[in-house]
Amino acid sequence: MTTIHEIQQAMYVETPHGDGVPLFLIDYGPHLNTVWVVANCEDGKVRHYGSNHIRITVNWTMDFNTKGKEKIKQDDKEF
């Protein structure tokens, strides 16, 4: 059974083609990876990626995916 889930919350992901905004997920069942449909930030192309090719980008506010990353400092303030 195939399920399509629209992503309502805005987030950014890293893909093999650069950063993008996920639009929805397609789940084909337990024997296949979930497919992410992502709009690329650079050129606007919509591409499909298996879940093993997607990584959620750093989110400093929620302290998500920050391990091993450095904050950007500007005018003695951390961003």
Image (cartoon, rainbow, N blue to C red):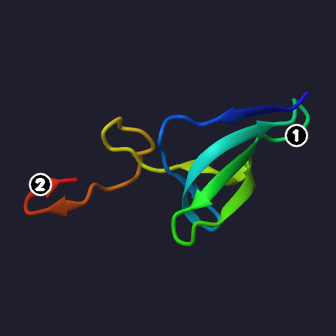
Q: Secondary structure at mark 2?
A: strand
In this rendering, the count of numbered labels is 2
For the point 74% across and 55% down, the residue is: 48
Looking at the rendered structure, the kind of residue marked 2 is Lys
Residue at 65%, 65% in the rendered image: 16
Residues 44 and 11: in front is 44
**Residue 40 occupies quadrant:** bottom right
Q: In the image, is 6 to the left or to the right of 29? A: left
**Of callouts 1 and 2, the N-terminal one:** 1
Question: What residue is shown at x 11% (from left), y 54% (from top)?
Answer: 77
Q: Are marks 1 and 2 in contact (CB under 8 Å)?
A: no
Q: Position of residue 68 (x, y in %)?
A: 41, 51
Neighbor class of circle 2 (other Cα within 10 Å; few <14, some 14-19, many 20+) is few
Q: Where residue 6 sits: x, y (%)?
A: 64, 36
Relative to 43, say whether 76 is above or below: above
In 3D space, how far apart are the residues under numbered discs 1 and 2 (Cα atoms)? Answer: 45 Å
Residue sitting farthest toward the bottom? 43
Q: Nearer the viewer, residue 72 or 10?
A: 10
Q: Please name the amino acid that badge 1 sits on.
A: Leu
Q: Is residue 72 above or below residue 12?
A: below
Q: Which residue is mark 2?
A: 77
What mark, if any, has residue 52 been given in the picture? none
Element type at mark 1: loop
Where is mark 1, residue-wise? 32
Residue 27 is drawn in which quadrant?
top right
Residue sitting nearer the eye, 56 or 4: 4
Report the residue at 51% width, 64% height from top: 41
Residue 22: x, y in percent? 59, 48
Q: Quadrant of residue 1?
A: top right
Q: Residues within 10 Å of mark 1 (few under 14, many from 20)?
A: few
